[in-house]
């Protein structure tokens, strides 16, 4: 596939949505044809699955059900949007992808990552992001930033320890794949975060253009 697949990851409130726009503008200025999307979601069906996943409910959602629904949404998203865009040579910029599954279901919920591996193989058939920005900050910082919204979804209701484990899960992924996944200190003021993002994008494209 000739396109470029970029993802933005991190805990809630670290600034993914805010910085997605910044990254998009940077890429567009570089002359790339950019499509933005998000997970879970990105298609009508996958957005319906997102709604099911995030709605608070009385019954306990089983971890396996949650994991399968994340991958069900992803399968649709890949088939209907991501793969066609990449085949058209576009730059796909997604707010979250499978690193989030390793962080939240693997780290947060402490599920067996070999099961996530298997589903990843089935659903993605080798598809991986080319470049990932991990906006990293201690969980309490992001949770404080989103407090003013006045509501929490089903997953946001988890205790801070859950998000601490998810953060560790993300950082372990970045450590294991340093050529793809770049850690940005998202606890800093927005201007500083965007300076780091710009430097990281510049360095990535410089390396890419050399090879
Ligand atoms: N999930 C999962 O479990 N497994 C998976 O495989 C996938 C997802 C794909 C939905 O994600 C949930 O699905 C999520 C993980 C799970 N659950 N939780 N909990 P989502 O991406 O839609 O939801 P989110 O992470 O909760 O997004 P968010 O709350 O919108 O956070 P954000 O996009 O990172 O933050 P923001 O909206 O850009 O910024 C939040 C506020 O902070 C806002 O007022 C900004 O103006 C402010 N902000 C941003 N940056 C700064 C800085 N640097 N300083 C000060 N203030 C700032």
Image: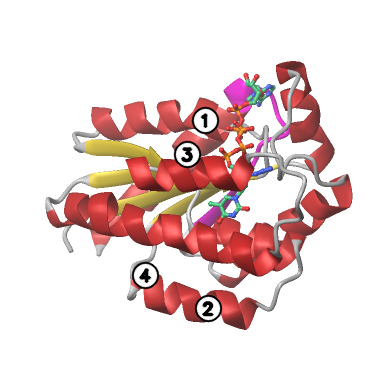
Q: Residue at x 45, y 35 (%)?
A: 198
> Is residue 179 rendered to the left or right of residue 100?
left
Give the residues drawn in magenta, as a range: 181-192
Q: Quadrant of ligand 1?
A: top right
Residue 47 is at least partly visible in this image: yes
- Report if the CB atoms under discs 4 and 2 are less than 8 Å apart: no
Does dot 4 land on a helix, a strand or a loop?
helix
| Residue pictured at 20% horizontal, 49% vertical | 85
Give the quadrant of the N terminus: bottom left
> Label 3 near label 4: C-beta < 8 Å?
no
> Residue at coordinates 26% horizontally, 27% vertically from top-left?
29
Count numbered badges in the picture.
Answer: 4
Q: Is residue 70 magenta?
A: no
Colour logic: secondary structure
In primary-sequence order, the first of circles 3 and 1 is: 1
Q: Which mark is residue 17?
A: 1
Q: Nearer the viewer, mark 3 or mark 2?
A: 2
Name the image quarter holding residue 37. Answer: top left
Mark 2 residue crowding within 10 angstroms, few (<14) / some (14–19) / many (20+): few
Q: Residue 124: percent from the left, percent from the top?
A: 36, 70
Name the secondary structure under disc 1. Answer: helix
- Judge: label 1 CB < 8 Å from ligand 1: yes
* Gap between marks 3 and 1 measured at Cα: 19 Å
Visible in this render: residue 40? no
**Which badge, 2 or 1, comes first in the chain's sequence?**
1
Residue at the front extreme, as displayed: 59
Q: Report which residue position mark 3 lands on.
A: 199
Question: Which quadrant of the view contains residue 136?
Answer: top right
The answer to which of 9 and 58 lies nearer the viewer is 58
Please give the label number shown on residue 117.
2
The residue where tag 4 is placed is 124
């Amino acid at each position: 596939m000739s396109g470029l697949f970029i993802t933005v990851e991190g805990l809630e409130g670290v600034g993914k949505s805010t910085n997605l726009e910044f990254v998009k503008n940077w890429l567009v200025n570089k002359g790339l044809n950019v499509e933005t999307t998000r997970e879970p979601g990105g298609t009508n069906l996958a957005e319906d699955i997102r709604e099911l996943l995030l709605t608070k409910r009385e019954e306990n959602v089983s971890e396996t059900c949650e994991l399968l629904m994340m991958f069900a949404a992803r399968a649709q998203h890949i088939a209907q949007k991501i793969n066609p865009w990449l085949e058209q040579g576009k730059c796909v910029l997604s707010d979250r992808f499978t690193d989030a599954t390793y962080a939240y279901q693997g780290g947060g919920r402490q599920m067996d990552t070999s099961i996530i591996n298997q589903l990843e193989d089935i659903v993605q058939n080798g598809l991986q992001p080319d470049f990932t920005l991990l906006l990293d900050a201690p969980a309490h910082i992001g949770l404080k930033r989103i407090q003013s919204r006045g509501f929490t979804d089903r997953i946001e209701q988890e205790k801070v320890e859950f998000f601490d484990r998810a953060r560790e899960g993300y950082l372990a992924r970045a450590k294991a794949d340093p050529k793809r996944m770049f850690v940005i200190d998202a606890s800093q003021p927005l201007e500083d975060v965007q300076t780091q993002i710009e430097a990281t994008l510049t360095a990535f494209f410089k390396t890419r253009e050399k090879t």
